[in-house]
C-alpha cells in the first residue's frame, strides 16, 4: 500500500505506507525529501490514549498524524537518529528520497507549482506572446487566455501512462484539483 503526497513544486509522490506505519509504531519520524525541489518534510504521529481502540499490547491507543516542512537550519547528524531527553524531539526512523512523477500540462511543459486551492500549474510564462505581431488587442487576449487555460490543465494521457495501475487507483480516489479520470477505468462518480 502507498500513501499519496503532492509537493508544492508540482510532483506527485507515492510513499510506502509500511515505512510510515513502522516509524509511527516505533515513535519516530520519517524524513521525506522531494528529489525535484529538495523540500524536506517530517512525517510522524503523536500517540494518545483512547479507550475505544487497542494496540497489540491491549493498551488504549490512538495516533494523531502530522507532517511539516523541516526548518531552513535543519541538520542531519548522528543525533537525529537518537532519542533525546525531551518528548518534543522524535528521532528519524528513515530518510526517504524520491524524484516523484512529473505532471505535464497542456502547454507541453511540466507543472512547476501545486496548491490545494488552484491545483497544478505551469508558471513559466511564455515570452512568445510579446514577440508575435497582432492585428488587434483582442487577438492577443484570445491567445493569452488559451495559454492560461492550457497552463492549468493536466495532460491526463501522459500522467496515466507514467503511473502504475496501483498509483492511478490511489490518485483517482483522492480529490486533487486538476486531475480528471473521466472516460478511464479509474473514473469516479
Image (cartoon, rainbow, N blue to C red):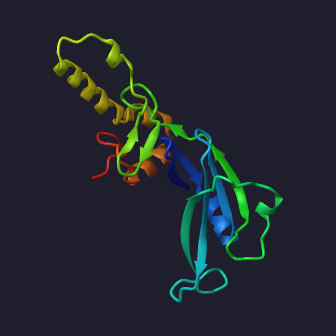
Q: In the rendered image, which quarter is residue 141 located in?
A: top left
- Most foreground residue, 180 or 71: 71
Return the residue found at the far right.
78
- Most foreground residue, 164 or 89: 89
* Side of 180 relative to 78 (left or right): left
* Side of 52 relative to 146 (left or right): right
Q: In the rendered image, which quarter is residue 149 located in?
A: top left
Number of marks: 0
Question: Which quarter shows the N terminus?
Answer: bottom right
Residue at the image position 27 percent from the left and 25 percent from the top:
144
**As drawn, 188 above or below 161:** below
Residue at the image position 70 percent from the left and 53 percent from the top:
95
- Most foreground residue, 23 or 188: 23
Instruction: Measuring from the top left, give residue 5's x and y in whole percent.
Output: 51, 51
Residue at the image position 44 percent from the left and 32 percent from the top:
104
Return the residue found at the far bottom.
51
* Side of 164 relative to 147 (left or right): right
Instruction: Measuring from the top left, give residue 188's x and y in whole percent.
Output: 31, 51
Instruction: Measuring from the top left, give residue 182's x and y in whole percent.
Output: 29, 42
Instruction: Measuring from the top left, give residue 178's x and y in whole percent.
Output: 35, 43
Residue at the image position 39 percent from the left and 32 percent from the top:
105
**As drawn, 55 above or below 173:** below
Amino acid at each position: 500500500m502507498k500513501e499519496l503526497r503532492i509537493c508544492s513544486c508540482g510532483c506527485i509522490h507515492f510513499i510506502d505506507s509500511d515505512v510510515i506505519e513502522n516509524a509511527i509504531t516505533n515513535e519516530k519520524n520519517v524524513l521525506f525529501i522531494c528529489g525535484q525541489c529538495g523540500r524536506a518534510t517530517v512525517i510522524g504521529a503523536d500517540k494518545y490514549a483512547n479507550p475505544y481502540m487497542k494496540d497489540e499490547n491491549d493498551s488504549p491507543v490512538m495516533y494523531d498524524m502530522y507532517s511539516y516542512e523541516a526548518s531552513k537550519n535543519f541538520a542531519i547528524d548522528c543525533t537525529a537518529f537518537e532519542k533525546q531527553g525531551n518528548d518534543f524531539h522524535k528521532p528519524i526512523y528513515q530518510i526517504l528520497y524520491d524524484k516523484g512523477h512529473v505532471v505535464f500540462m497542456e502547454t507541453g511543459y511540466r507543472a512547476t507549482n501545486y496548491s490545494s486551492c488552484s491545483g497544478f500549474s505551469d508558471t513559466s510564462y511564455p515570452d512568445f506572446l510579446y514577440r508575435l505581431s497582432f492585428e488587434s488587442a483582442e487577438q492577443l487576449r484570445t491567445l493569452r487566455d488559451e495559454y492560461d487555460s492550457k497552463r492549468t490543465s493536466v495532460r491526463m494521457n501522459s500522467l496515466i501512462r507514467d503511473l502504475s495501475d496501483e498509483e492511478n487507483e490511489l490518485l483517482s480516489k483522492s480529490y486533487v484539483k486538476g486531475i480528471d479520470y473521466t472516460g478511464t477505468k479509474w473514473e469516479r462518480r
